Image (cartoon, grey):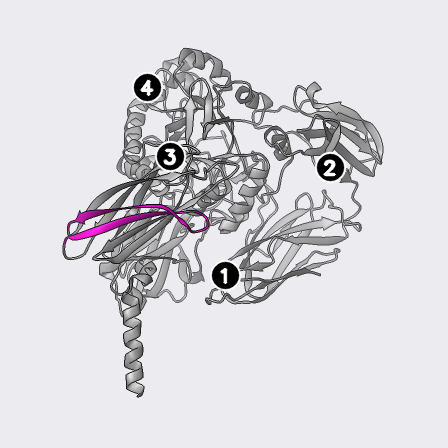
């Protein structure tokens, strides 16, 4: 009886596994981030399977070793005075039973940089670019019944190889992909919507099928479009013959009636499910998020989305998140992007490289229009500052060394990875490649207005600007091989020079960096050219050039968030141009931009000493600190930002008068006064009715710590933000506090790092101690793999400590997650 039962059970399992209903297992894509070994430095023979790595450091990916420091003047200001070097990663794993007969691949979302990968000592390949994803097949080199070792060498000895901080290491996700011999090729689904309206949309899908089975096969390619409720809206299928060891494409199309359009206000998404069947059995299934939207650029009318004219209120962003370097969890970027959206931002420029995969997912879901950008330099290196921005002698290391061999593939891979995303609406082939004399030059630089230029006038020994025509034409041709549904652009810094070349002509739309003064002249001279602001400063007139000209569709502020690198002289080690600081906290300039870009009623007040001038340059921020703590008899300026009709200021309940926004040419309301402690409040009015208010209260001495937690529970590897504030006896933030905090954790979680937004602090980012700045500090808390209670204790000498508790729950499927609770003591 026992043997009969086992035979019955085995037969049942085999039958069920063979059924089409188990088809979702035809393909698996699992994170491959856990339990790696790491060694900083070079290690002879570390690629070999039998290499002894027991004494190496254990860690989980993503990982950025540069952010672990230490900060030092021996490194470069361009990359934040943090080290590069060589690092090795190794991971030992076994092949699961259900993967034994499948094709296995390692997919890297990005490794900075010059990565080389081995499996069981076999060299799989090298990828110089640190920002583009890549994949290697490992099937033929696996020990399917024993242990396997993947080894990765990362070479970032050229630490000053970028104009901003890049990090070092396997700083993005790694996946193990398992597929059947007949499967959808890497990035093998192309989804386009050539006709879109509120009544109907045409969908065209091209599927690339790979056949590694021993013979030619007839493959049924099936596409299904599912709405957010999971209902199949429409479908199509087609038969295609794929030869042994070959690839073949299947082109399908279908109509969708009354599609839910994707927009920045309502980012409606569908799921496109692509299935492959051979002899009626499913061999692969791929699902991608897609959307329906139409957009257009017009040389005279600007930009429209779904037939509606709109202005692109954009910001540029880099990859890092201060204390986390470039190994940034998804939750961190989600918090940042939601904050930017609340400020009125509707578009992002991915400067100046492809970003982590999940950021694009967030943009699809949150409703951002995205410019994806490939390169910051082409065949010749740009200046990389060592001793401070525009100080001393620059270095020239960088991607240009690999451009000739790798540029076409890197550009293609950027486009193939993201071509189905509704958020992406243009591809950029380069940023400031034409920066005058860095490196290209032209005789016209001896004359005219050149707001951005390196050196004086024409440099005859530099590469000629005419080379820009040849290179840009080639890159545009490469890009259009893979996508013709979006315009190709570039961000031009030396328009006065590039206008003497074909560079602007080969682009579909032309970005101008800090060249607002050229808009009217070039619009008249080149009436068919679509011009937009691809990088701009904070001055109001830069926005007015967009807001008052129908033919200018966009502004992309430099920058949305402060970032590491592109720093000044030591001790500066990061750039403060952002609307948000390194911790993602809102800066005063954020609220000014919100007053220009957001429709939601708002008012903000901040204070400063009465300045001689507010404008100190194109990146100059308005001084309006959110504090009402000054010395007796100080002369203080109160600045008010609002999108309402007028605002009224009150000091201790007494009105200091109303002021109308219409009477302020600079869109800022000012009250100059002598300081008196108490409560300062602004009320904003629309059509005579109060719509918003903001208050500042004079804070007393620091007394206690107040912590806010943004999550009640964490899933496995989930991240929570702990906002730490120094407060007085009444719970008011003490803006001038700089107390040092100590954060200790008990339970299944770890401290990833702490960030206060400082540009000059050189404390260890991985320490459990850090000072607050402006009374605030952000701690990143990450759950480990075990369930349980987490207790976070925050202490500082002389302050009442704070304890924050949350739970990490075990999900029903064995993974961490589920409901939980939080409490503050």
Q: Name the foreground residue: 499 vs 477.
A: 477
Q: Residues within 10 Å of mark 4 (few under 14, many from 20)?
A: some
Q: Report helix, strand or loop for mark 2.
A: strand
Q: CA distance from mark 4 to mark 2?
A: 52 Å
Q: Earlier in the sequence, mark 2 or mark 3?
A: 3
Contact check, label 1 and label 2, Cβ < 8 Å: no
Residue corresponding to mark 2: 694
Q: Earlier in the sequence, mark 3 or mark 4?
A: 3
Residue 75 in view of the camera: no
Q: Which residues are magenta?
A: 216-243
Q: Report helix, strand or loop for mark 1.
A: loop
Residue corresponding to mark 3: 375
Q: CA distance from mark 1 to mark 2?
A: 39 Å
Q: CA distance from mark 3 to mark 4?
A: 19 Å
Q: Report helix, strand or loop for mark 3.
A: loop
Quadrant of the rendering where the C terminus is positioned: bottom right
């Amino acid at each position: 009886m026992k043997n009969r039962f086992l035979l019955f059970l085995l037969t049942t399992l085999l039958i069920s596994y063979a059924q089409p209903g188990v088809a979702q297992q035809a393909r698996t894509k699992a994170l491959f981030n856990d339990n790696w070994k790491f060694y900083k430095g070079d290690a002879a023979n570390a690629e070999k399977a039998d290499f002894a790595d027991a004494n190496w450091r254990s860690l989980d990916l993503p990982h950025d070793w540069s952010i672990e420091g230490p900060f030092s003047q021996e490194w470069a200001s361009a990359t934040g005075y943090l080290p590069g070097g060589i690092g090795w990663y190794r991971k030992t794993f076994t092949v699961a039973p259900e993967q034994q007969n499948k094709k296995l691949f390692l997919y890297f979302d990005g490794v900075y940089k010059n990565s080389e990968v081995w499996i069981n000592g076999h060299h799989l390949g090298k990828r110089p670019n640190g920002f583009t994803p890549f994949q290697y097949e490992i099937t033929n080199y696996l020990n399917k019944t024993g242990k396997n070792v993947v080894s990765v060498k990362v070479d970032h000895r050229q630490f000053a190889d970028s104009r901003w901080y890049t990090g070092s290491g396997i700083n993005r996700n790694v996946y193990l992909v398992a597929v059947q011999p007949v499967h959808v090729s890497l990035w093998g689904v192309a989804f386009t919507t050539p006709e879109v309206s509120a009544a109907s949309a045409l969908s065209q899908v091209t599927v690339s099928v790979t056949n590694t089975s021993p013979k030619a096969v007839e493959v049924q390619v099936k596409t299904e479009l599912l709405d957010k409720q999971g209902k199949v809206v429409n479908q199509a299928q087609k038969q295609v013959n794929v030869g042994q060891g070959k690839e073949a494409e299947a082109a399908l199309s279908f109509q969708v009636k009354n599609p839910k359009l994707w927009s920045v206000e309502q980012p409606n998404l569908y799921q496109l499910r692509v299935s492959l069947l051979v002899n009626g059995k499913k061999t692969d299934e791929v699902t991608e998020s897609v959307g329906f939207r139409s957009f257009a650029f017009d040389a005279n009318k600007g930009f429209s989305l779904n037939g509606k004219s709109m202005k692109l209120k954009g910001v540029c962003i880099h990859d890092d998140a201060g204390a986390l370097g470039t190994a940034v969890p998804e939750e961190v970027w989600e918090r940042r992007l939601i904050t930017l959206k609340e400020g009125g931002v509707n578009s992002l420029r991915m400067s100046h490289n492809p970003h982590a995969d999940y950021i694009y997912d967030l943009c699809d879901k949150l409703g951002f229009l995205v410019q994806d950008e490939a390169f910051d330099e082409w065949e010749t290196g740009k200046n990389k500052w060592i001793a401070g921005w525009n100080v001393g002698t620059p270095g020239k290391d960088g991607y240009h060394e690999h451009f000739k061999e790798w540029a076409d593939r890197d550009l293609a891979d950027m486009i193939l990875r993201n071509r189905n995303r509704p958020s992406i609406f243009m591809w950029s082939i380069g940023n400031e490649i034409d920066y005058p004399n860095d490196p290209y030059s032209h005789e016209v630089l001896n004359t005219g207005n050149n707001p951005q230029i390196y050196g004086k006038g024409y440099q005859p020994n530099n590469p000629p600007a005419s080379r820009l025509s040849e290179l840009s034409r080639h890159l545009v041709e490469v890009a259009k091989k893979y996508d013709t549904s979006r315009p190709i652009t570039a961000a031009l810094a030396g328009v006065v020079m590039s206008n003497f070349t074909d560079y602007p002509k080969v682009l579909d739309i032309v970005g101008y960096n800090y060249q607002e003064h050229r808009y009217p002249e070039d619009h008249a001279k080149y009436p068919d050219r679509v011009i937009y602001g691809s990088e701009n400063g904070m001055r109001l007139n830069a926005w007015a050039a967009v807001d008052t000209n129908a033919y200018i569709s966009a502004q992309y502020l430099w920058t949305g968030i402060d970032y590491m690198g592109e720093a000044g002289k030591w001790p500066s080690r990061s750039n403060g141009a952002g609307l948000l600081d390194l911790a993602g906290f809102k800066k005063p300039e954020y609220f000014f931009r919100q007053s220009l870009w957001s429709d939601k009623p708002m008012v903000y007040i901040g204070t400063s000493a009465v300045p001689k001038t507010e404008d100190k340059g194109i990146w100059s921020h308005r001084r309006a600190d959110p504090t009402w703590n000054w010395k007796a008899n100080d002369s203080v300026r109160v600045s008010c930002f609002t999108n309402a009709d007028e605002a009224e200021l009150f000091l201790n309940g007494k009105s200091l008068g109303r002021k109308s926004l219409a009477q302020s040419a600079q869109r800022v309301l000012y009250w100059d006064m002598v300081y008196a402690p108490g409560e300062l409040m602004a009320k904003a009015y629309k059509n005579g009715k109060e719509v918003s208010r903001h208050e500042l209260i004079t804070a007393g001495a620091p007394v206690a710590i107040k912590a806010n937690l943004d999550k009640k529970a964490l899933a496995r590897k989930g991240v929570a933000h702990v906002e730490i504030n120094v407060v007085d006896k009444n719970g008011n933030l003490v803006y001038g506090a700089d107390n040092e905090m100590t954060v200790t954790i008990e339970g299944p979680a770890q401290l990833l790092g702490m960030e206060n937004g400082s540009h000059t602090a050189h404390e260890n980012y991985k320490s459990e101690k850090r000072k607050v700045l402006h009374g605030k500090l952000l701690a990143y808390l990450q759950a480990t793999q075990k369930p349980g209670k987490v207790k976070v204790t925050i202490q500082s000498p002389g302050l009442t400590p704070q304890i924050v508790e949350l739970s990490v729950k075990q999900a029903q499927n064995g993974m961490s997650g589920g409901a939980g609770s939080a409490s503050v003591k």
